[in-house]
Amino acid sequence: MTATTDSAPPQAEKRPLARRLAGANTLWIALVLLALIVVFAIIDPSGILNVTNLQYLLIETSVLLVLSVGMTFVIVTSGIDLSVGTVLVFSGVASALTMNALSGGDSTNAGWGVIAVGGVVAVGSGALWGVVNGLLIAKARIPALIVTLGSFGAALGAAELLTGGSDVRSVPTALGKALGSGTSFGGIPNMVLLAAVVAAIGAWLLATTRFGRYTYAIGSNEVAAQRTGVGVTRHLVLVYALSGLLSGLAGFMSLAYFTTTTLTSHSTDNLNAIAGTVLGGTSLFGGVGSVIGTVIGVFIPAVLNKGFVIIGVSPFWQPIAVAIVLVAAVWFDQARRRARNQR
Amino acid sequence: MSTPLLEARSLVKHYGSVEALRGASFEVAAGEVVSLIGDNGAGKSTFIKCLSGAEQPDSGEILLEGKPIHLDSPTTARSLGIETVYQDLAVAPDLDPAANLYLGREIKRGGILGALGMLDKKEMRRRASEEFARLGVTLQNVDVPIGALSGGQRQSVAVARSVVWASKVVFMDEPTAALGVVQRERVLDVIRKVRDAGIGVVLISHNMPEVLSVSDRVEVLRLGKRVARFTAGDASLEDLVGAMTGALVQEDVS
């Protein structure tokens, strides 16, 4: 770099915090979530602010949150990962079968050594699916939609082949007690703590590190990233591997919570994760998004669902309400982009 | 002229049966602005691609400070101090100017956080402000996405990104295309500042008055070969156009 002579010009300042906040999608979506909670709380004060209800709301959302953190990275690169839900199932199955095999067929009374191996298998098999996705997308240049649609089917098929189509029901009791239904710090569910740690690490990684910066750069302009020497292929493989790894972790959490492999209940997890991510302000066109936004976005469908149950509205309204909010969110994003590109 | 900073000798490049370059030569010295002109299809873009590492010539030699070099990728060229400003503005519109300036060359924090990949955004913003000030690029904010800036500001940032990192040569492919008069002058000022810092600037442009006003020398390509060389002070618009169209031939084109 050449030597500098002048000092920084006064006009090149950071904008004040308030103005930056007002310009951020995250603030508006947070206000929507807050408004929802306030409305439900006014209609039925003892309903949504009740500790048990809140605990269930958080636990039920924690698995989806872990998936959505990975999805945020993928969508910021302007990609998509449809395989998260079935990779979750595959990882749970691989983990449960490994723990059973290590315990002579039934891992119900298995100790922490076996559980640790199960955890590694879950995370590792998820990451492996992610690497395969990433290689096909970044190296073979096959559209992410098609690649992950393929692995969406393939992972579920592989899981069913491994289990013969019926759920594995022997899961270590110690795992269920500790992670699935355990609490820490006076009542905070361990599932929620784990999801919060994942979200915090994800937020740090995306917002402050070089890995995160390259994720944004690739989503914003892949050619520009390539020309400035960013290893685009390698980075995309890592991003899909991260999404796979988190799906594997989510599979392990799901196994701990349900103490069964739940083969059939994750076919729309991918869509829920995409919805939560996009609601949280992450742009499907790439280059824009945040993990904090995703955390808020994931809770909007969850709060709508719980709220409708509490105030006695048919829960069938929930997907309709989510759909409206989702379409509106994407519409705002597109309008914003159009306004910008006209300059 | 002493040893040129960057020199190309008889570059040949085929695309299938099409001969884009037929033994094109070129040179640029430190601290001079050389314009490379030619009609559409003369081979300017291919030539620049070969000299910036984006393409490899089929035959011919490229020398940096008198030593033969092999440019197998733009990364290699950059590591040798050769930067390129692309016509299609290779910036990431969702990142702020500082992030674009430092893309691929991020400054990390010290200590364990830096080892984990954490960036020193404050330092990058501070240094970016200094660089923009030095090059006369004025921006209201350094933390808005580049996409929210005007076309001229965006172009200025793209130009600044290349010249800040170039230690030897900068190629600029139509850096003032699509700019207003004021913004165009500003980019030309940047070019002069870069030249005065001792860097060789190679400018591709279709705007002849601009070429004559900013260049020290002009080299003309026609049908994949260099056909003429001018000192900008001695050349007229007619000379340049004549050389481009084939009416005037200085060099051996047989």
Image (cartoon, grey):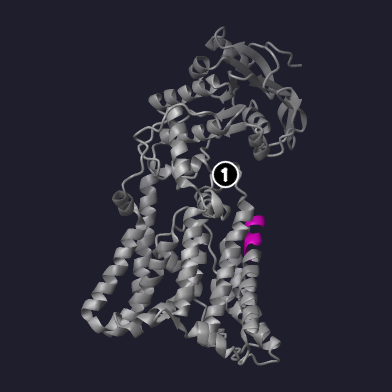
Q: In front here: A58 or B84?
A: A58
Q: Which residues are magenta?
A: A133-141
Q: Amino acid at mark 1?
A: Gly
Instruction: Relative to B208, say whether A118 is above or below.
Output: below
Give left or right: position of B81 versus B177. right
Q: In the drawing, does residue A325 fall left or right of residue A230? A: left
**Residue B94 image position (x, y, % from top left):** 45, 48
Q: Is residue A33 above or below residue B77?
A: below
Q: What is the magenta segment's predominant secondary structure?
A: helix
Residue A247 position by quadrant:
bottom right
Q: Kindly tell me whether residue A197 is visible in this rendering.
A: yes
Seen at 63% across and 84% down, the residue is A96
Is B162 situated left or right of A301 in this image? right
Question: Which quarter shows the N terminus of chain B?
Answer: top right
Q: Examine the rendered structure and indicate whether residue A155 appears above or below residue B100.
A: below
Whole-percent x, y for residue A103 in the image: 68, 89
Residue A63 position, x and y percent, is 48, 76
Q: Residue at x 63, y 17 (%)?
A: B219
In the rendered structure, does residue A27 fall within the stretch colored magenta?
no
